[in-house]
Image: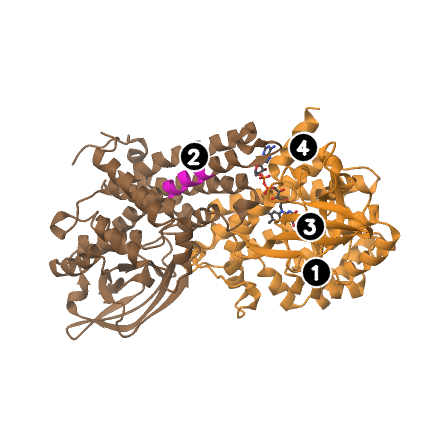
Chain colours: A brown, B orange
Amino acid sequence: MDLNYSDEQLLLKESAERFLKERYDFERRGKIIASETGFDSGIWSDMADLGWLALPFAEENGGLGGGAVEISLIMEAVGRALMVEPYLTSVILAGGLVEKLGSEEQRVEILGGLIAGTSRPALAHAERQTGFDLGNIAATAIRSGEGYLISAEKPLVLGGQFADVFLVSARLDGAVKLFAVPADASGLTSTEVKLVDGSRASDLVLDNVRVAASALFGAGADTLAEIEAAHDRANAALASEAVGIMDALMDATVAYTKERVQFGKPLAAFQALQHRMGEMAVKCQEARGSALLATLSVDAPRSMRIRGVSGARAKIGKVSRSVAQEAIQLHGAMGFSEEMPVGAWFRRLYAMENTFGTTADHLKRYGEIIRDPAVLSGSLLREPV
Amino acid sequence: MDLLMTKDEVLFRDEVRAFLDAHLSEDLKRAERLNPSFLADPSVGLKWQAKLNDKGWVAPSWPKQYGGTGWTLAERYIFDQECEQAGEPHLRGASIKMIAPVIMRYGNDAQKGFYLPRILNGEDIWAQGYSEPGSGSDLASLKTRADLDGDHYIVNGSKIWSTLAHHATRMFALVRTADTGKKQEGITFILIDLKSPGVIIRPIRSICGTHEFNQVFFDDVKVPVSDRIGQEGEGWDIAKYLLEFERGGAFAGGVLRAMLTRIHRLASEPLPDGRKMIDDPLFMARFAEIATDVDANDMLELAAMSKVQAGGNPGAVPSSTMKIERSRIRQSIAELAASILGPDALRWEEHRPLHELPEESELNEERKVASAVYFNSRSQSIFGGSNEIQLEIIAKTLLR
Ligand SMILES: Cc1cc2nc3c(=O)[nH]c(=O)nc-3n(C[C@H](O)[C@H](O)[C@H](O)COP(=O)(O)OP(=O)(O)OC[C@H]3O[C@@H](n4cnc5c(N)ncnc54)[C@H](O)[C@@H]3O)c2cc1C
């Protein structure tokens, strides 16, 4: 066991924070959100140059071989900066699936483009009825000539507005499979959706979209299990993003109450408020612990992975909501206005509570898994495999 | 003690219901359903106010001599519960509930005769001008100046967070007329015509995406001395009197019960995966818990108002308790409603007002507005004296 960041990791953390602080302040973000595309291509190519887009992938795929800890550091910085570009959805979620399931050719093409900053894949999996049951998929793929015809309705595809290729799940002979579908395929319609956190998604409809045989990912693999594992990696990343936001809310609240004077004193001089901020800090610490457990559980056996990841999403959903509400309250009317980033952090945390499973969904999933006494009683330390 | 309605009160309730059935149109209900804010957009509120005015029911809490209803407490409670269940637009804000009682108590006959009828018929909409950039909870530190110049005051400074000032015709404001003595003693209460030269209104958007409050700047704005309420230096006492109305002077329980009823409808509808939230024990436990809060708050309101009716004062602790509880209940209902949206919670409709968008099913519209209602609910514990300030009042009373 070792829970200390390495020197390289500390450097990465510092450089991620510095880069986003310089390049992605609140005002700049406001301009990106209000722009036609809602996306800053300059930032994206800078991230390619910094190696962020290559970070989680194996060296043999052109990546840097970073692990979940490195990702968590980037995500904390992403959270604080409220970045709307699809790092989580294109790199971690879709990129991760391409790496796990893609053929040599697919990896070269899609991952190569992703790492270079020229391609942004997006996963189109969940459907309206899917809820938190990732296997509840109605989309169909049928063989036709040399390839497949895919029909699907995929609402709220995150990162979809910025994607050039979709990983679309559909049932082929009853089993869920993934297919690469170019964004400009004929029969595919994409409708832009504005999201509560300022980012954008797509409602996708595929009506008999024809793809080549080579579009199929992982012919022999258990695709659904890989999709679930990819969601857990994404959920661990979300947990770290939330921690980054919570720390930012904490810092902003401390700074504001030190500056704002009422009744002849800074607000921070009132003990009632000192204790409230003390409680916020307790929650930030707890969330950090949960997020770290999630981060270090993504490669664990499934039950341990769920304990770490869904436990963190459930716990962090609750404490992050409370910290955000407190931050608004302690800012008074200023926190209720759009003049400050407090409200934007609050809204991003709210979006996260409804992304890749709600807080309640994760609590239930966690509750199910700890019914197994072996999981419940097992310490956090595991035997190496 | 009992909770029984008299025969007349039953008849009254039926009369209110029949009136609401006949006059509260689907359009108005829909506009209110799609309103994330505390108060209705005046374009909506005034339409409903006109219908109430024809019936003489605009101001349930005003005495009859000023054009109010003169209703008993029980009648007002019944009216509030019925209007809220029916989904009326919330039009009773700064005009009817705040400035009117002040004018009745402190205004002279000329002021009463001029301003009160204009409130009832909707000619005037009032904004509240208390807070300033440097003065929120510590209201008495306010700096906006009013300097006497013949038969006018010359006003300079700025008010902030003025709700609906961009629709208002007038603002009642606390201004500084003296810098000597205790800071409370130099405050005066004046009425400002917002069309006066030198008034500039800057919009501020809230975290729920709506433009509902503003910053208002005054640059040498002339206000006739005849638009001062009470004496110079009496502003602080008047403000305290008014705050009683803002905090506890009217029923608020009806809206909470109506909001609960709305969530219940939403939760009874099958989700896309076939489940219903009302079958979910996690949801139901929270729902039932909040419902007990609503009942308790209703009783608190009735008890406080009974005291007032018997000529007493509800007291600081119950008043502040109600302000705190109402805000918490409203926030927890809004939070619970938003928690059952699932992934659709991500969808954000920017357009305001929402009722201008094409009509959808009632439940879809409930879903569309639920996130914004939740965001908006966070203001409940901030305005009208924050919950921390209420706790200060309670603690001071206890430890006196
Ligand atoms: C939606 C909305 C509508 C509003 N409409 C109007 C309007 O129409 N007209 C108008 O005049 N004003 C309006 N206000 C302003 C409102 O009255 C103020 O927000 C309120 O008085 C608090 O002041 P503040 O926002 O400056 O917060 P601050 O006073 O700066 O307080 C910030 C935080 O510190 C806490 N705090 C302050 N002092 C203490 C203390 N001594 N001990 C412990 N905690 C303390 C507060 O409770 C709050 O949590 C509105 C506000 C909102 C949010």
Q: Quadrant of ligand 1?
A: top right
Q: Amino acid at mark 3?
A: Gln
Q: Given this view, does label 4 or label 3 mark the residue nearer the observer? A: 3
Q: Is residue A337 visible?
A: yes
Range of the magenta residues? A242-252
Distance Cα–Cα, label 3 vs label 2: 37 Å
Q: Given this view, does label 2 or label 4 mark the residue nearer the observer? A: 4
- Residue picked out by circle 4: B393
Q: Chain of mark 3?
A: B
Distance Cα–Cα, label 4 vs label 3: 22 Å
Identify the secondary structure beneath mark 4: helix
In the image: residue B7, left or right of residue A43: right
**Residue B42, horizontal then vertical, whole percent:** 66, 61
Q: Given this view, does label 1 or label 3 mark the residue nearer the observer? A: 1
User: Residue B326 lies in magenta, yes or no?
Assistant: no
Neighbour tally class for label 4: few under 14, some 14-19, many 20 plus, Cα within 10 Å:
some
Q: Given this view, does label 3 or label 2 mark the residue nearer the observer? A: 3
Please tell me in which quadrant of the rendered image residue B301 appears: top right
- Residue picked out by circle 1: B195
Q: Chain of mark 1?
A: B
Identify the secondary structure beneath mark 1: loop
- Does label 3 point to a residue whose CB lies under 8 Å from ligand 1? yes
- Residue picked out by circle 3: B128
